[in-house]
Amino acid sequence: MALLPLSEEQVLDRLKQENPWWATGAVDDDYTKMQKRLYFDLFFPLVEDISIKRAVILMGPRRVGKTVMIFHAIDSLLKRGVSPHQIAFVSVENPFFNKLPLEQLFKACIKATGKSEPKGWYVFFDEIQYLKDWEVHLKSLVDSYPHVKFVASGSAAAALKLKSTESGAGRFTDFMLPPLTFNEYIHLLQLHHLIIPTQIDWEGNATSFYETTNIALLNEHFLKYINYGGYPEIIFSEKLQVNPSRFIKSDIIDKVLLRDLPSLYGIQDVQELNSLFTSIAYNSGQEFSLEALSQASGGVEKNTIKRYIQYLEAAFLIKIVHRIDHNAKKFSRANYFKIYLTNPSLRSALFTPLQPTDKLMGAMVETAIYAQWLQREWFEPWYARWTAGRTQGEVDMVGLSPQNFKPLWALEVKWSNRYYENPSELKSLMSFCQSNSLKSALVTTIDKSGSRAMNEMKLHFLPSALYAYTVGKNTINQKKVRNI
């Protein structure tokens, strides 16, 4: 028996269900009562600006709050006086819609609201990657309806970025929504009372940092952030917190590894990719080589490993960090590199949540701090590692000048108070700083703050949780300045 096609009436009825403000004039309370992510203030001006004839592509990993951000944008448009009958939301993954061209869906929205003029509309297509050739459809809409603002979102970040770059030149504006920073975690849970602004004297300049009213409580939340705090849905759900791995693994990792990446890149052996990601996740923050990864994966060819790593990085699951030597020189061949998870919660999803005393806690604190820095698309982090004769050393993170590639600062991430008590043990850090004429460096601790003078250098110590908060907070502030 042949299947009956969906009738126009069914499509219109479904659109009315997805757009309750057509009848009520307001977004459902389920969304409006949720705290906005701090990234909303950067996203909404792109949506609101109808003078620029470009679609906005809201991309990011799964479950970081993209759909909620869209409903917050709709709520804000309504409160600014936009007619509820000129705002449309369409979930493209809905079986009712995912075979229909975008223009047909837009025309159906116009018909469902009784409008005739396709001007002044704001149209949101959610999970657009489920529509074949979506970028061609969307580009055509932007060209055909210059007085309509189109916004599309999707979780297959790699696919969206690839298609947007290839086909959307001059038509699309990409906006990446990352996992929660620790600053946003504090914001969403309204824990601002734990944070106090302060300053550090950095080589004669007062630099903004933060201290806390209760380091023990802040560290409790930092541990929760590391274990599951990258996802807004989990931080508000005690039920999900009991077993975060089930939620993160099944709904985030598996869908990316088993569905998104294979469909985008034609990967045949999904098990190979899964095994590689599991190995990387367990060893986040460690130094890798293609040779070692090939051996650890049972002899998978190095070129295949290299491609998988590129796919995982494009999917915003991992970040490759490259190495410099003792004199901050780059290596001509990148045989060794570090790989970090972009979100420390991914590790807890595959294995077990960490406790403060776990031996892997240090590596995950380092991963969490790198995750804060990765939100700065204008910044490239490096690490230093060298062998000179019988001596060797390493510095966890180095910031290089974009002009001359000389070190601007150095950071050592520790989940320990030991070096606060014995700063002379930080031989690698001090050696690197002296070789590169750095007079200051920063070292993180568990709960100790203060400065130590060492060999004409000043070492600043700050709890890891406060440092992570500071980087996330400063990143948002800098993004706002750059967007002005």
Image (cartoon, grey):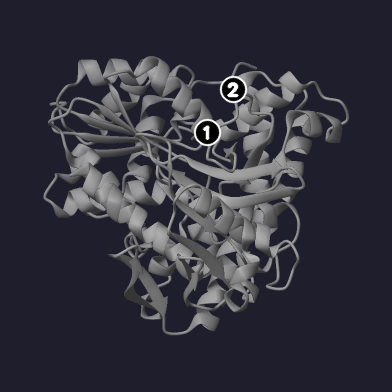
64 or 14: which is nearer to us? 64
**CA separation in Å, label 1 and label 2:** 9 Å
Inspect this view and state whether residue 305 appears: yes
Query: Which residue lies most toward the right here?
Result: 298
Whether residue 162 sits left or right of residue 118 in the image: it is: right
Give left or right: position of 481 versus 244: left
Residue at 25% in and 21% down: 142
Is 150 situated left or right of 376 in this image? left
Name the amino acid type tagged 2: Leu
Q: Position of residue 10 (x, y in %)?
A: 41, 32
Asked if disc 1 and disc 2 are in contact, CB closer than 8 Å, the reply is yes
Q: Position of residue 449 (x, y in %)?
A: 48, 77
Name the secondary structure under disc 2.
Answer: helix
At 36% from the left and 53% from the top, the residue drawn is: 475
Q: Mark 2 — residue?
A: 264
The residue at the point 28 percent across, 55 percent down is: 477
Question: As shown in the figure, which amino acid type bears the numbered disc 1?
Answer: Ala
Crowding near pointer 2: few (<14 within 10 Å), some, many (20+)?
some
Q: Which mark is residue 156?
A: 1
